[in-house]
Image: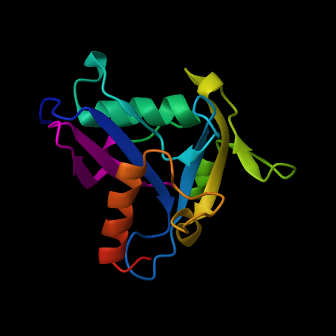
Amino acid sequence: MQEPYTVSSVGVLLHTGSLERGGFPKFVLVEQLDVEGHPFGIPAGRAEEMDITAVGTAIREVYEETGLEIEPKRLQPFVDVVHATAQIRRVFSYHIGWEELGELTYDFKTYAYHLRTKPLVADEIGRILLVRCDDVFLRGGAYALTYRWDISREIKAKLESRRVI
């Protein structure tokens, strides 16, 4: 049985490879068209009453931002970010297989994946990229996680502790 909802927002670190040393993960990043500069970030969003649990929010956000339907059993708690305002932001990890990535269409002109199906909020999402872990955390890099920087800082710390980066 899942616990009642206790967090204010959720992010999902969709990845190929392993999140352990030598796993060479790549992350699915989405371009945020509704944010100035159109930064890239992990699928994430605020909890809504209809979600009931953090897992429910994670499933909804991944679908809204990528069009992918993910399996609840495969979501793994990765890190909780606690703020002074007592808000908790939970990040899950989800190992995504190549067959699931096949649900997206790759465009060789833009070097990005695009949605085959229209998600619920497609107007706020642009390109979907599969980016090497090292490039995601490269300071000043084109795909550096500058959007939701507080969450990305905690993700980076956890990956460093596992010696992934």
Q: Is residue 109 left or right of residue 124?
A: right
Residue at the image point whose x is 22% and y is 24% from the top: 52
Residue 92, position in %: x, y?
33, 49
> What is the magenta range?
72-96
Residue closer to the observer: 28 or 75: 28
Q: Is residue 79 magenta-colored?
A: yes
Q: Quadrant of residue 31?
A: top right
Residue at the image point whose x is 55% and y is 20% from the top: 120
Q: Is residue 89 magenta-colored?
A: yes
Residue at the image point whose x is 36% and y is 50% from the top: 150
Residue 131, position in %: x, y?
61, 61
Please determine whether, in this image, residue 135 is positioned above or below residue 29: below
Residue extending farthest right: 109
Residue closer to the observer: 32 or 15: 32
Quadrant the C terminus occupies: bottom left
Give the color scheme: rainbow, by chain, secondary structure or one colour.
Answer: rainbow
Residue 17, position in %: x, y?
49, 68
| Residue 102 appears in the figure | no
Residue 160, position in %: x, y?
36, 75
Q: Quadrant of residue 56?
A: top left
* Labels in figure, total: 0
Please determine whether, in this image, residue 126 is positioned above or below residue 49: below
Residue at the image point whose x is 27% and y is 42% from the top: 89
Please determine whether, in this image, residue 128 is positioned above or below residue 61: below
| Residue 121 appears in the figure | yes
Magenta segment, prevailing SS (helix, strand or loop) = strand
Q: Is residue 73 left or right of residue 147?
A: left
